[in-house]
């Protein structure tokens, strides 16, 4: 039977491809190098290998030992600085389909993705790969670099990802899937999953926690390797122990053979920029096309992209060039521009008129002298503020579809109050407020910020790493928090936003804010405001309500004795 020759004193049978390997050791001890050698022997045996690489070193497989010429491994690279195609965070499932349908080996370089995107990609990929392999049972080896990232011991908020990788490691063998879990932090890899590993390839290990994790594995497999354990701390770079109690029944010191391809994790020499290494192109044909489709689809569903498109369309609409004027009829163009400018002026003066009416209404309530206290910003300045434009229905429908897709996080172990706070933060983020004041969050979540139920839930979220406390008593979602929060299912118009806020305020705050919203972006003096709301400016209920609006972040104090509605209530036209 064919064997994979990985070391001078060690060849392993081909079913190594479908086994769960683990490579453990301190930084620079030789894990990636050895796993690289194993992968090379598998590729030489025409086996399918997929590498999930959050570090960005595995592109080295494509180059020969010197790093100057192509290697014999024409393995495509998706993502990273050397990718044949960029990686699309949403395309995990699609890439899994590509892997299963084509039987191609591939490096998935997720090193350039942000943490949340990496998680998203890896989870979808692992889930779909497992699912598809159930019907396509052929050997496939998945090398997982820095596997504590994908198979974490502390899985809080990452249950779906952990579950997907756990399935691959535990059950994958039934469908031909083997893995190589590579890690310098065995104690941070989920214990249950790591205990499934065999063989274990152990390099130099010094830390107590790291060694305890290995001891835990030994207990699990019933091995007594105290002698070897004692030697781990003194191992040299590249030297390791190969432990396989049940599969090959061997416990031996060894050293993997020299690799044929470039060692991407070697420290670059002076003047040697790894990023600039050119790889010969690999034809990805169908994948390249479908990846482009996913990118386009994602853009079409992305509210930020939608807003960009809307803004572009608006621009195009603003100047209506008459038909036939396109060639070079400068006079016609001038006429059209003049007309458009005239129309725009008309629109703005109508708006200014409406605003003046509102001010006059306030003046009516104020009686004499009140209006002088209200500074009016020049109309010209007003005219530069864009109006909120409703999105075209088909685009809104696309966003709706995207947001109403079922949440797949499953039971994420959050209490009701915790979820409410996360959702309030997500809601505020959707209107552009990324770091709201504590009291604003409490308000949106329908809590008093001083109650212990609010404070406890907030503290718990911080401990779980879902929110961050920022200076000035502000809060923000972490990447994990963004993933755990339920995001609003609709694009708000400014009006809906203000109505929602007004409807939840107590009477006095509601009255005051209504006046401020009417006057926005003009600020209103305390005296004028008190009169407009029929409060006396000196009563405590007036002062308290005013103060409450300020601490909720809905009112600002642009100058002494003046108050103004906050810009966050007007996301469509924030100055
Ligand atoms: N079997 C070997 N033969 C020759 N050189 C080796 C061997 N094993 C390791 N090395 C050398 O040791 C260096 C460090 O090894 P490697 O990159 O595999 O470390 P690592 O354990 O993956 O470290 P990190 O945790 O930082 O990723 C390699 O760049 C290579 O030069
Ligand atoms: Mg490494």
Image (cartoon, grey):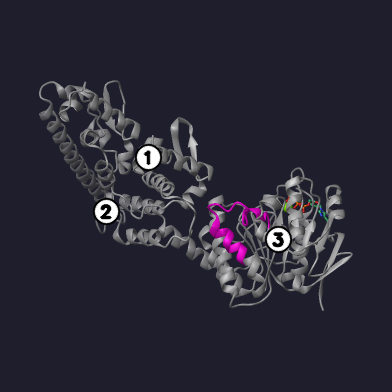
Q: Distance between the residues labelled 3 and 2?
A: 71 Å
Residue 468 locus on image (x, y percent): 50, 40
Disc 3 is placed on an element classified as loop
Pointer 2 and pointer 1: residues touching (CB < 8 Å)? Answer: no
Q: Which of 492 and 464 is in front in this view?
A: 464
Q: Residue at x 54, y 59 (%)?
A: 160
Looking at the rendering, which quadrant does residue 550 occupy? top left
**Residues in magenta, as a range:** 145-167
Q: Indicate whether 77 appears above or below 25.
A: below
Q: Quadrant of the C terminus?
A: top left
Q: Distance between the residues labelled 1 and 3?
A: 44 Å
Mark 1 sits near ligand 1, with its Cβ under 8 Å away: no
Q: Indicate whether 58 appears above or below 134.
A: above
Disc 2 is placed on an element classified as loop
Q: Which of 392 and 548 is in front in this view?
A: 548
Numbered badge on residue 321: 2
Disc 1 is placed on an element classified as helix
Q: How crowded is mark 3: few (under 14 residues within 10 Å), some or many (20 or more)?
A: many
Q: Nearer the viewer, residue 127 or 360?
A: 127
Q: Nearer the viewer, mark 3 or mark 2?
A: 3
Q: How crowded is mark 2: few (under 14 residues within 10 Å), some or many (20 or more)?
A: some
Q: Provide the residue designation for mark 1.
A: 442
Q: Provide the residue designation for mark 3.
A: 195
């Amino acid at each position: 039977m064919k064997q994979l020759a990985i070391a001078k004193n060690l060849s392993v049978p081909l079913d190594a491809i479908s086994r769960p390997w683990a490579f453990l050791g301190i930084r620079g001890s030789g894990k990636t190098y050895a796993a690289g050698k194993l992968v090379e022997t598998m590729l030489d045996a025409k086996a399918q290998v997929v590498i999930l690489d959050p570090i960005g070193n595995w592109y080295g497989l494509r180059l020969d030992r010197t790093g100057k010429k192509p290697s014999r491994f024409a393995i495509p690279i998706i993502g990273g600085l050397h990718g044949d195609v960029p990686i699309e965070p949403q395309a995990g499932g699609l890439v899994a389909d590509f892997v299963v349908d084509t039987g191609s080996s591939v490096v998935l370089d997720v090193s350039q993705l942000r943490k949340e995107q990496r998680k998203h990609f890896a989870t979808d990929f692992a889930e779909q790969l497992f699912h598809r392999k159930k019907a396509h049972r052929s050997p496939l080896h998945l090398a997982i670099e820095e596997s504590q990232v994908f198979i974490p011991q502390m899985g809080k908020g990452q249950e779906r990802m952990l579950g997907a990788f756990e399935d691959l490691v535990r059950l994958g063998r039934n469908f031909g899937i083997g893995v190589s879990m590579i890690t310098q932090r065995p104690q941070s890899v989920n214990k249950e999953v790591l205990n499934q590993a065999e063989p274990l390839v152990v390099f130099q290990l010094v830390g107590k926690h790291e060694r305890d994790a290995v001891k835990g594995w030994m207990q699990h497999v019933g091995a007594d390797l105290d002698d070897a354990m004692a030697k781990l701390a003194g191992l040299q770079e590249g030297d390791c122990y190969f432990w396989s109690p049940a599969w090959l029944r061997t416990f031996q010191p060894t050293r993997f053979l020299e690799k044929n391809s470039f060692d991407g994790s070697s420290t670059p020499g002076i003047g040697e920029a790894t990023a600039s290494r050119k790889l010969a192109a690999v034809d990805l044909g169908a994948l390249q096309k479908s990846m482009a489709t996913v990118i386009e689809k994602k853009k079409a569903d992305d509210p930020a992209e939608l807003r960009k498109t809307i803004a572009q369309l608006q621009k195009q609409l603003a100047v209506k060039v008459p038909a036939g004027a396109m060639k070079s009829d400068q006079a016609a163009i001038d006429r059209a521009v003049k007309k458009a400018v005239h129309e725009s002026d008309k629109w703005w003066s109508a708006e200014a008129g409406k605003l003046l009416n509102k001010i006059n209404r306030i003046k009516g309530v104020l009686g004499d002298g009140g209006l002088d206290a209200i500074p009016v910003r020049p109309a010209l300045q007003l005219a530069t503020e864009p109006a909120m434009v409703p999105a075209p229905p088909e685009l809104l429908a696309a966003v709706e579809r995207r947001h109403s897709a079922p949440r797949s996080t499953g039971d994420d172990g959050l209490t009701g109050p915790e979820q409410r706070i996360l959702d309030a933060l997500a809601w505020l983020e959707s209107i552009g407020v990324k770091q709201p004041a504590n009291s604003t969050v409490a308000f949106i979540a329908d809590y008093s910020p001083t109650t212990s139920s609010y404070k406890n839930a907030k503290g718990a979220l911080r401990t779980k790493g879902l929110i961050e406390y920022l200076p000035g008593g502000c809060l923000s979602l972490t990447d994990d928090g963004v993933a755990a929060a339920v995001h609003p299912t609709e694009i708000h118009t400014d009006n809906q936003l203000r109505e929602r806020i007004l409807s939840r305020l107590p009477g006095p705050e509601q009255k005051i804010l209504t006046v401020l919203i009417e006057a926005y972006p003009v600020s209103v003096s305390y005296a004028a405001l008190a009169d407009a709301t029929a409060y006396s400016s000196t009563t405590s209920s007036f002062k308290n309500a005013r103060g409450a609006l300020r601490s909720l972040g809905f009112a600002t104090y642009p100058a002494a004795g003046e108050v103004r509605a906050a810009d966050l209530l007007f996301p469509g036209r924030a100055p």
